[in-house]
Amino acid sequence: MDSINREQEEENHKDLQNAEAGKKIRELADKASTCFFGTGIKTGKPLTVRPMAVQKLDDAGNLWFLSANDSHKNQDIAEDNHVQLLFQGSTHSDFLSLYGRATISTDKALIKELWEPILKTWFTEGEDDPRITVIKVETIEGYYWDNKHGDAVAFLKMAAGAVMGKTMDDSIEGKLTV
């Protein structure tokens, strides 16, 4: 445990598995709705990262994105399908890091399901644009940092801790295994 965690008076570490992990992934990813999508995990070079909007996610920790077939991201996934997704839902909580495997599909029914009119900015021919692909990320593992009772309670605990000279934050963190 980190030294700061030894100063905690409350439990602040809880690993989550299976359905509970999937539920936490959904909760935190929904709050952010976008993430930094990293590729090139196993290259030994700096991670290539770009912002991406999550189009769909399920309780099993799977996430879907729309991407162009000629993008660097799709090319990176073709070379190494291991990806890292980084989420930040608010300034002081709702942090999520997911590691998973990405697959690329051209399933027209799935594209139609995930389509939103704003996406015409990138896919000018609409949902029938031949460049559209679906990226599905299957989570292998993750880690989260959150607070237990919301930002207001977390702030009050931090303020009280500062006054009393104690570590009293409302944080909770742990490994996610789906």
Image: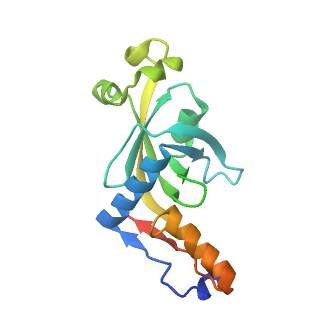
Residue drawn 50% across and 84% down? 10
Query: Relative to residue 77, is residue 117 drawn left or right?
Result: left
Which residue is rendered at x = 61% and y = 74% of the image? 158
Q: Choose between 63 and 166: the one closer to the eye.
A: 166
Is 162 on the left or on the right of 60, as rendered? right
Residue at position x 45%, y 55% in the image: 28
| Residue 107 to residue 3: above or below | above
Q: How many marks?
A: 0
Q: Can residue 145 be seen in this view?
A: no
In the displayed structure image, the side of residue 112 where residue 134 appears, left or right: right
Residue in the foreground of this view, choosing between 78 and 48: 48
Q: In which quarter of the image is residue 128?
A: top left
Residue 97: percent from the left, percent from the top?
A: 53, 58
Residue at the extreme right: 45
Q: Quadrant of the N terminus?
A: bottom right
Q: In this rendering, is residue 117 above or below 41?
A: above
